[in-house]
Image (cartoon, helix red, strand yellow):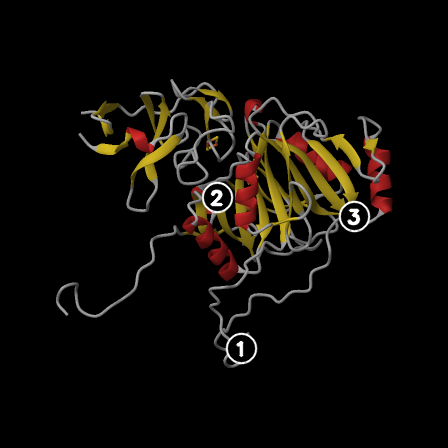
Amino acid sequence: MTPLCRLDDIPDGSAVGALPDARGRDAVVLVRRGDRVFAWVNNCPHYDRAPLGWRKDAFLNGDGTRILCAAHGALFRIEDGICEIGPCLGQGLTPVSVIISEGTVCLAG
Amino acid sequence: MRIIGPDELVFGVDNILDCQAFLADYGLTENGPGCFEALDRTAIVLRDKDDPSLPPPLATATRLRETVWGVEDQATLDAIAADLSRDRDVVVEPTGRLRTVDDAGFRIAFQITRRVKLDLPPERINSPGAAPGRAANEIGADEDAAARPRTLSHIVYFVPDMDRMANFYIDRLGFVITDKFTNTGPFLRPQANDDHHVLFMIQTPDYMQGLEHLAFHMQGPTELMLAGSRMVKKGYESFWGPGRHKFGSNWFWYFNSPMGAHVEFDADMDKHDGDWTMREVPMSKEAAQLFLFENVAKWAPGGPPPGKG
Ligand code: FES
Ligand SMILES: [Fe+2]
């Protein structure tokens, strides 16, 4: 089980990036809702090389209700990753399975 | 028809503080609420998405609400108003600014340009066989250089019908095509600007219509690298670059932005006049750039392998 971060390191209602590659780009986006964490691959379905955020840990729209692609403004539902508006309309983010074990968010399996 | 280029891009956003911080770090200077200027006063304007002064949004994800074109003189404004009002509403504001819509449905405006004439040094380089660009003892690598965007260079739209869109800018506003990617779109320049392009478009389905990117010109490639490296160091997300395009020859470095559009630094774009013959090639990875690099962590050479000194 690969640990990603402590649940407490994600302020409730916000997002963080995890699992940085050699260049420092986070491979996974984690969004916290209370005791639940939704995890998505940090890549927009619109382009094969498009990270979602605009700055380290900056992945959500203004009111924190959607994941924003900072390339062309696509908005994704946090819970199921579906794009509601934008270039990848109807497509979805790729899910990452995570579990929370003793306060640590880990890759499942 | 003396149109110069984009003067202002107006965004309606739901995260204005993030956008303000981004544009300040990008190197623009806030002058008046939400107005972020380059050295020649071309600007990005930020408004809350519900601000009643904004034109209505497109039905797509784009947060761009208006593109304001700068023109040289009143005669150009008068000619635009006379022609466009034949088939669409043109509102003339008390300031003289015209507001209307293009054939793709983008909100556009025209004004006597807000640009001030710049008189600044170019990037100076030393090339063997040529006269030195810098005097003896004049240093090229200045870590503390300000690296401020000089002027708004170009915008790129996603459009549902590139031919209809291009023809509007060509037939009604006097733009000319400099080069073209077949099935993607043309590079356009207006009559009062010799830059390779101020407008490019990419053909897309209609639910994608919006702004692909905007770009400001930097002094030269060194300043572009410096500005881009500073963005990376501050944690901003590099999207594409640094590299050098083929069409236009400009150096580029694109970043994601909280405005939901790519924001590019560019430098050293080609200039053209009426003697130029348009080139056309299919869009491809090869055609999109001469070369492409990516920023990596800094490194320094040393002596022996670690632990053997
Ligand atoms: S890359 Fe995400 S919307 Fe285009
Ligand atoms: Fe560009």
Label 2 – label 3 distance at C-alpha: 31 Å
Mark nearer the N terminus (2 vs 3): 3
For residue B248, side relative to residue A9 (left or right): right
Q: Amino acid at mark 1?
A: Pro
Queried on whether the Cβ of the residue with tag 3 lies below 8 angstroms from ligand 2, the answer reads: no
Q: Is residue B186 visible?
A: no
Q: Secondary structure at mark 2?
A: strand
Neighbourhood count class around disc 3 (C-alpha, 10 Å): few under 14, some 14–19, many 20 upward: many
Q: Which residue is mark 3?
A: B2
Q: Quadrant of ligand 2?
A: top right
- Front of the two marks 1 and 2: 2
The chain letter under disc 1 is B
- Front of the two marks 2 and 3: 2
Q: Is residue B154 above or below residue A16?
A: below
Q: Which residue is mark 2?
A: B255
Q: Which is more toward the observer, B303 or B181?
A: B303
The chain letter under disc 2 is B
Q: Amino acid at mark 3?
A: Arg
Q: Are marks 2 and 3 on the same chain?
A: yes
Q: Determine the image quadrant of residue B275.
A: bottom right
